[in-house]
Each structure stands twice: as C-alpha cells, then as structure tokens.
Amino acid sequence: PHSTPAMSVEIYNPATNSWTVAGAMITPRGDVAATVLPNGKVVVAGGFGGGDEALHTAELYNPATNMWTPTGNLNVGRRGYALALLSDGRVLIVGGVNGGSAALASAEIYNPQTGNWSFTVPPATRRFGHTATTLINGHVLVAGGLDNVPADDITFAAADLYDPVNDTWLATGALATARTDHAAVRLPNGQPLVIGGSNGQSASIVRYASTEGFDPTGTVITYPLTLLTSGPGSVTASPSDSQYVAGTTVTMTATPHPGAVFIGWMIGNTPAGWRGQLAITMAGPRTVTATFVAAPTFPDVAPNTSEWSAITQLAARGIVKGYSDSNFGPADGTLRAQLAAFICRTVGWAEQDWGNPFTDQGEVDAELWRNVGTLAHYGVAQGYGDGTFGPTDSILRAQAISFITRAMVNKGYWQPQPDNPALFDNVPASSGHRQDIATYIHYAGPTPDGSVTGPFAEWDQPGTRAGFARALWRAMDSYFGQ
C-alpha cells in the first residue's frame, strides 16, 4: 500500500552537508523520478497520486526562482517508472504502473524545446520498479523490475538497450540476479552499476546488498534488415541474414526479370541510387526496396546498343517518351521545348510553374511551355535577343550539353569547372558553351560523340534524340547512379 503523496521538496548542499526546504511542487506525488535538464531545470512527471491513481501531469523546477511550473502532460499516467536523460537533452520515461495497477510496456520522450511528451517505440517487456541508465554511447540500459500481468509479480533479470538515434530496443546481457526496486548509477569509467533491490515477493521478501556492473563494450548489438521488391525482379543480400551485428557491411544485388529493368534503391523513404549493387553499413534497422519496371520498347531502337540502354533507362523513369506510333525517332532532332521537359523531369522540376517570359508559345502544349518557363526561371535556358525561345527549333549539340550541365549545377549535383580551351578548341568561348562542356566532361565523361579533346564535331548543328538521350543518361548516372 502507498502512503499519502507529498508536495514537499528538499535540496542537499554537499558543501555544508545539510538539507534545506525548496519550493513545493504544484501536485502532491510519490513513487516518481526526476532528472536535471541541460538548461538546469528539473523535470518530474507522473507518480502516485493517491489510491490507485497514476498521474499524467508533469512539472518543472527552476532553481533560479525556486518555483515549479506545469509542463506537458504524459500520454499515459504512470508511477514506478524509470527516467533517463538522453544525450541530446530529451528525456526518456519507460514502463511503470498505470491507474489500474497494471505494468506498462510503453515509453515516452519529453522534448524540453516544446514541453511535450510523445510516444516512442515500446519495449518488448512490461516492467515497473526497474532502472534506466544512459550509457556513454547514448544508449539507455533498462534493467530488472517487475511484471504483474496477468497476475503474480515476476521479477526480471532481463535487460534491454534503447537506441534513441534509431528509435529501437535491443536485448542485451541479463543481470546475474533478478531484482526490483534497486538503484543504478554510471561510474566515472562509463560502467553502469546496479545496486541493491529485492526479489519483489511481498510474501517472502529478500533484500539484496549485492551490486552488479555492466560492461557496455562487450554488448553485441544487432539490427534487422528487411529486403523488399517492387515490380518484376529479385534482390539478394551478402552476407545473407535477417539480423546483422552493428557495423556490418551488407551488399545487396538487384536482378530484374527478363524484359524488366531495375530503376533504383530506396532505404526507407530515401532514394539510394540505381547501380545494380548497393552496399550499406548496418547502423540501425533498415528497410531496403529494389524497384523494377517492365522495360519500355521502341520498334526503331535497336536492342543492346548504347542508345538503346540510355533510351530504355530514361523511358523507364518517365523522362523521355516516344511518339503516338510507338516509335522513338532516335535520328530525329530534339526540339528545344522537348528538351526542357526532359530536363525538368530529370531534376524534379516537372510540376513547377514559374510562368514564361517568352512570347512564342505557338502550338506548343501547356506542359512543355511551362517547363520552358521553369528552365528560364532557374537560368538553365536562355531565349533569343528578340524575346522569343524558339520552342520548336532543334536543339544544337552544344546547347544540349549546356542545358544539362546548368541544370545539374543549379541543383547542386555538380560544381562549375574552369573553362579549358584544350577541350573542343573549335568551340569559341564567346558561345557560352565551352565552360559547360568542360564541367560536363569532368563529371560525366566524354560527350556522346565519344570525344574528350579536339574538335567537337558539328557542335553548332542540331543533335539527335538518341544523342541527347545518351548525354542526359550519362549525366544522370554520374550522380544518381552512385
């Protein structure tokens, strides 16, 4: 049975070896824990409020004013919990007993910046009367305690580690003695020490004078890897396992089914390139998805050629499209408005609308014209001196390289490189293309004609759709394929 909860607070002064009365709490509460925040204030939450009540409220003590003020409420009333200050200044509260005296498996984190508590991933074990100790590596060691569900009290020797960076719980080495109502401290050498406690059995109570140390350096931490596929293909991992020791490098291989193409990896919700293999270091739980689509085909694009690969890869990603008769027209010229759409789709600008400063839309559809305006907004595309863009003009070979390069630079994927007159010395510096060409070659390698130095053949002549596809794919692959 619990005694009457109290509001009183005392402060110990080690210099005088004495206690003095401090400002009283707002709410009487017992069976609580408190911790000092980085700003010097003290947070206390929940606790026993009388009868079987477990409080939701929390409050802050300000030593400068000797006063308590309310802060955000817990999501679950709890007493007999454990509290730990995380390395980033937040506070973890785990377990405890609710208002119905049932042990809890939930955990919450307090953010001093917002004053709010929010649920975090729950531990696997219900417990109260346990301890929580923050380790040097930032993990929190939760050890011992009791579980009273479904009926009899069960005293734990089990211990778990909470990883606040990855928001995960990991099993670790158990206590030598199952114990509850004990204390825990972190020694100057970083080793947690568990002190005293009891067996938790009210009918035959045994109280302990023993202590135990925990060596965090000997803890083996493992993380799960979940492999998923989207579309017609498969993915394998080497080494193959479902749990990996932290720090293990895992290499995954994506294999498209016949008639399919692999278009990229996702780690969680983050794109991770589109090479056929992906290597990651296990520093937390990971979910990796390999995405495949049916390979687009065009009757007029010969398979297994350099242009086939570029066109297929771009078409699979929705960047380039064929004609209504299913052909691609690899030898056709690329219109300036078409190129604007291709580039906007590549760098994520396709849905943006910045208007259009040019006066010659003509019969160009709204999507292409919007994309022309977007490239003008970002300084990628320039019009003619008379205020027109020439959307149905064919893009010149050097212009195509410039447009691609300027988009990659604007997005921060590439950095401008110095002009190099030795590269394509037949391209005049006054054209504005030579530095763009130098930047392109630095990152993407040779231009589609295969040259690195010497004349840029027909640089001022219209390029083909196949040539542009090869140039764009090389640029994309130089960055996104990593």
Image (spheres, rainbow, N blue to C red):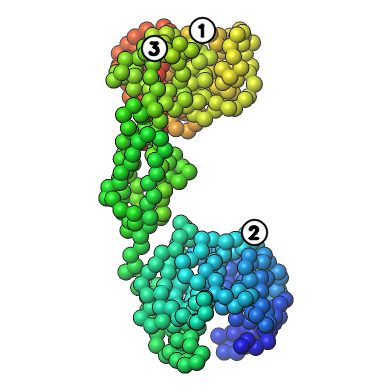
Q: Mark 1 points at which residue?
A: 393
Q: Mark 2 points at which residue?
A: 114
Q: Toward which corner of the image does residue 316 lie, by quadrant?
A: top left
Q: In which quarter of the image is the C terminus?
A: top left
Residue 253 pos. (x, y %): 30, 40
Q: Measure how far apart labels 2 and 1 are at the Cα level.
A: 56 Å
Q: Is residue 17 above or below residue 41?
A: below
Q: Toward which corner of the image does residue 364 lie, by quadrant?
A: top right
Residue 440 pos. (x, y %): 39, 23
- Helix, strand or loop status at disc 1: loop
Foreground mark, 2 or 3, reads 3
Q: What residue type is labelled 2?
A: Thr
Q: Name the residue under label 3.
A: 330
Q: Quadrant of the N terminus?
A: bottom right
Mark 3 Cα shell of 10 Å, populated few (<14), some (14-19), many (≥20): many
Residue 226 pos. (x, y %): 39, 50
Is 386 left or right of 414, judged from the image as shown? right
Chain-order first, disc 2 or disc 3: 2
Which residue occupies 46% across, 24% down?
A: 319
Which residue occupies 55% across, 85% down?
A: 14
